């Protein structure tokens, strides 16, 4: 075995635990003698939960290459802050997504959803690592539209909802095939992001609140601003309410926005996608994922024009996928119930937009430091991005006034 490493290896990667992981990946691929090259898989600071590296392992005997993604809390001051999210993602890959892969084996490849394979994982304190296959090497790539506050194309939105329906349907198949195991899992996958213990430990409570406040301050409509400031007093209660289980629930992605997808294109046409980042997977109503995605990826004009059609895309895909397993969707989740759930979840879309739009227009200029555990002291972009943010905030708040969503939030009983 060779430990020759490209000279550009980031300091954050340089430790015994991570080098040992790469040795293990090489052994799994029957590579005895190798060199490897390491680079950040995303911009430094873009992923504030973990360090994410792309590692290319080259067999020195036949020059064959294996590319993997390494997600780790090792060598970060976020190890204690985000251990629970790391454990949640490892559990998602080991106990849920691996089962989904097996469930899909009976299907044609064209009918399956794409999820990176987990090659190696570790939840031990001080060695928090998750190693996945690198789908970028297979032609999948990020779409940067949302980072520029641009909408996804209609075809892309339909593709996401088509695949999201299959993702949710796999949860149904899993549950029906193994009720006892699934019952245990759904209790272990209760929402984590908005629970008090995690919010306090991770410092995310202030993060959510500060992002929300920044968005509300951009509003010129003083009446709407006052209403939203009143809502802020129960922001966490509302987020917990909307992500709690309903009559019908599945294992949801939990952080369903464009930075957690990779798209595949052929001749400038998006043909496929895969899902990434399952730290927030939770047992909840599927409408939480749908509304989360639609509010962050489209504007009010798009939703007004296409909401009915794209919800039909989702439900038809959900129905068709379950039919492949001889399951009648109308017996477990009718279209009327589905549409009612989406309608009930629209206020959640407003809240998430006011929080997350600030995130996607933020430049993380420095990493968390040992002496200052507030990762979320961030500097917002100036100029065009700030103007676009104001336009999007105004847009979603105006929509919420017109359709009564903001008043519905204000009337929630625990706000009185």
Image (tube, rainbow, N blue to C red):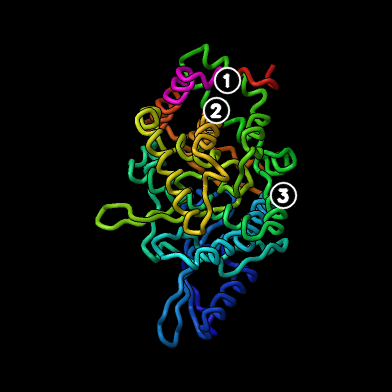
- Range of residues picked out in magenta: 395-407
Q: Quadrant of residue 297?
A: top left
Please tell me how crowded label 3 is: few (under 14), some (14-19), or many (20+) other residues with Cα within 10 Å. Answer: few
Tell me the residue at 41%/65% (across/down): 109
Secondary structure of the residue carrying tag 1 is: helix
Q: Is residue 9 rendered magenta in the image? A: no
Q: Residue 338: percent from the left, percent from the top?
A: 52, 37
Q: Which residue carries the number 3 mark?
A: 187
- The Cα atoms of the two marked residues, 2 and 1, are separated by 8 Å
**Is residue 11 among what the camera can see?**
no
Tell me the residue at 33%/55% (across/down): 271
Asked if 48 appears above or below 205 in the picture, the reply is: below
Asked if 203 appears above or below 140 in the picture, the reply is: above
Q: Residue furthest left?
A: 267
Can you tell which of label 3 and label 2 is closer to the viewer?
A: 3
Q: Which residue carries the number 1 mark?
A: 408
Tell me the residue at 65%/42% (across/down): 193
Are the residues tagged 2 and 1 within 8 Å (C-beta)?
A: yes
Q: Magenta: predominant secondary structure element?
A: helix
Comparing 379 with 207, the one in front is: 207
Q: Which residue carries the number 2 mark?
A: 347
Q: Residue 348: which numbered mark, if any?
A: none
């Amino acid at each position: 075995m060779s430990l020759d490493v490209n000279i550009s290896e980031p300091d954050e990667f340089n430790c015994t635990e991570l080098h040992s992981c790469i040795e293990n990946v090489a052994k799994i691929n029957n590579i005895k003698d190798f060199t490897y090259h390491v680079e950040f898989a995303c911009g430094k600071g873009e992923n504030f939960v973990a360090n994410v590296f792309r590692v290319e392992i080259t067999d020195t005997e036949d020059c064959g290459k294996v590319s993997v993604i390494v997600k780790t809390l090792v060598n970060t001051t976020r190890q204690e802050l985000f251990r629970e999210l790391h454990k949640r993602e490892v559990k998602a890959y080991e106990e849920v997504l691996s089962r989904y892969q097996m469930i899909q084996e009976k299907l044609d490849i064209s009918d399956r959803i794409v999820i990176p394979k987990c090659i190696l994982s570790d939840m031990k304190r001080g060695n928090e690592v998750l190693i996945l296959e690198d789908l970028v090497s297979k032609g999948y790539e990020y779409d940067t539209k949302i980072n520029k506050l641009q909408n996804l194309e209609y075809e892309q939105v339909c593709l996401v909802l088509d695949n999201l329906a299959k993702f949710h349907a796999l949860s149904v198949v899993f549950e029906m095939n193994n009720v006892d195991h699934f019952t245990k899992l759904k209790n272990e996958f209760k929402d984590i992001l908005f629970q008090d213990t995690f919010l306090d430990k991770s410092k995310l409570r202030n993060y959510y609140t500060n992002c929300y406040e920044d968005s509300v301050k951009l509003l010129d409509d003083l009446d709407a601003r006052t209403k939203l400031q009143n809502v802020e007093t129960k922001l966490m209660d509302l987020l917990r309410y909307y992500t709690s289980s309903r009559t019908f629930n599945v294992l949801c992605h939990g952080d369903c926005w464009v930075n957690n997808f990779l798209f595949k294109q052929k001749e400038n046409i998006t043909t496929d996608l895969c899902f990434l980042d399952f730290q927030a997977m939770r047992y909840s109503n599927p409408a939480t994922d749908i509304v989360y995605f639609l509010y962050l990826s489209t504007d009010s004009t798009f939703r007004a024009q296409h909401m009915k059609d794209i919800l039909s895309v989702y439900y038809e895909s959900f129905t068709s996928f379950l039919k492949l397993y001889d399951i009648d969707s109308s017996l477990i989740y009718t279209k009327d119930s589905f549409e009612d759930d989406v309608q009930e979840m629209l206020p959640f879309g407003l809240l998430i937009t006011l929080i997350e739009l600030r995130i996607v227009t933020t430049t993380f200029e420095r990493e968390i430091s040992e002496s200052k555990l507030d990762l979320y002291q961030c500097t917002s972009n100036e100029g065009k991005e700030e103007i676009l943010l104001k336009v999007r905030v105004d847009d979603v708040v105006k929509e919420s006034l017109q359709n009564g969503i903001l008043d519905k939030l204000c009337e929630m009983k625990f706000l009185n």
